Image (cartoon, helix red, strand yellow):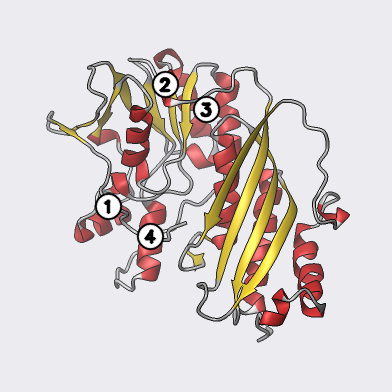
Amino acid sequence: MSNEIITLSHGSGGKATNKLINNLFYKYFNNEILNQQNDSSVLPLINGRIAISTDSFVINPIFFNGGDIGKLAICGTVNDISMSGAKPLYITVGFIIEEGLEIDELEKIVKSMADTAKKANVKIVTGDTKVVERGSCDKIYINTTGIGIIEDEKYYYSGDMVQAGDCILLSGTIGDHGMCIMNNRENLGFDVDIKSDCCLLNFLIDDILSVSKNVRVLRDPTRGGVATTLNEIIEHSNISIEIEEGSIPVKKEVSAMCDILGLDPLYVANEGKLIVIVDKDDASKVLEIMRKNEVGQDAVILGKAIDDGKNKLYLKTKIGGKRIISMPDGELLVRIC
């Protein structure tokens, strides 16, 4: 294992930069488009509507139970493109690296990105590397842009498509990522093994769209959790949403940690969960196909859209009461992605 570290010379454009690019980035990201090695990459002709998304990843710590900043960057970008019903094709990556980062750590991150991109069937086609002085960033930041193609004529998935009676489906347990990062980072001393749910959702979405043409919304409830995402959907609709407390899937370790810290799992971040709003007549078959997918085995029908003219998110409690779930006032935990 090498003790070699990133130095400012790796960002100078000279021999050290060239060595880093050739021995690390080209080694793992190798494909015919990237290998054009020009200032810009020329993509094949794309026929259809183009979906594009950009994101930046500053997570702390950069390695965590269930993933790392590299895997997160690819999963997050692929998932965002997929939420529009698009097929993700290409990703660009930009690295901001702090002087002093061990090259072995950088290689683990780059390899993780390459492995995840291969699994998603996307290509990393261009990128950039900058090195900054110690203290100017926290080890490494990654910026990505994703490009996808919308092949289906019906491509518009948005809150304003939701109708009263539609069902709200959730692909699995909530709060895993946020509590994993909090437990890894804050040294709280919880003796629990919580693993981030960081994963690719594009193939799950393909499965869903193969059985239903009546999907209204596809969203991944990342920062702010399920409660924030549902409130955002409601803001763009003319309906309210009612969810069942007894249907909310939460792992016991996550629930226990949230109870101790006074947190509500509905507001805790996820990085591998999907909210689907679909016509009630298609809900059962969508739920069935979700449960057949590896990342949707714990899928549930969480609730339904209702028309009460108030545009609110309601939680129907286990004892039959009902309360309003609002947007959070602030970030529960920063730098979780």
x and y percentages locating residue 71 in the rendered image: 59, 57
Rounded to the nearest angstrom, the CA distance separating label 2 from label 3 is 25 Å
Of circles 1 and 2, the one toward us is 2
Could you tell which of marks 2 and 3 lies nearer the N-terminus?
2
Kindly tell me whether residue 193 is visible in this rendering.
Answer: no
How far apart are the two marked residues, 4 and 3, measured between alpha carbons?
Answer: 34 Å
Q: Amino acid at mark 3?
A: Ile
In primary-sequence order, the first of circles 4 and 3 is 3
As drawn, the label of residue 289 is: 3
- Relative height, residue 280 to residue 131 (above, below): above
**Nearer-the-camera pick, 128 or 249:** 128
Q: Amino acid at mark 2?
A: Asp
Amino acid type at circle 1 is Ser
Compared to residue 224, the image places residue 98 above or below, namely below
When asked about the image quadrant of residue 121, the answer is top right
Viewer-nearest residue: 250 or 185: 185
The residue at the point 41 percent across, 25 percent down is 159
**Label 4 sits on residue:** 334
Regarding residue 5, the answer to whether it shows in the image is yes
Q: Nearer the viewer, mark 4 or mark 3?
A: 4
Q: CA distance from mark 3 to mark 1?
A: 27 Å
Q: Residues within 10 Å of mark 3 (few under 14, many from 20)?
A: some
Q: Residues within 10 Å of mark 2 (few under 14, many from 20)?
A: some
Please state which of the two labelled residues, at mark 4 or mark 1, is closer to the viewer: 4
Q: Position of residue 42 (x, y in %)?
A: 83, 45
Find residue 255 and name its label. 1
- The Cα atoms of the two marked residues, 4 and 1, are separated by 20 Å
**As drawn, 230 above or below 103:** above
Q: Which numbered disc, 2 or 4, marks the residue that appears first in the sequence?
A: 2
Residue 39 in the image: state x and y as whole percent.
Answer: 81, 56
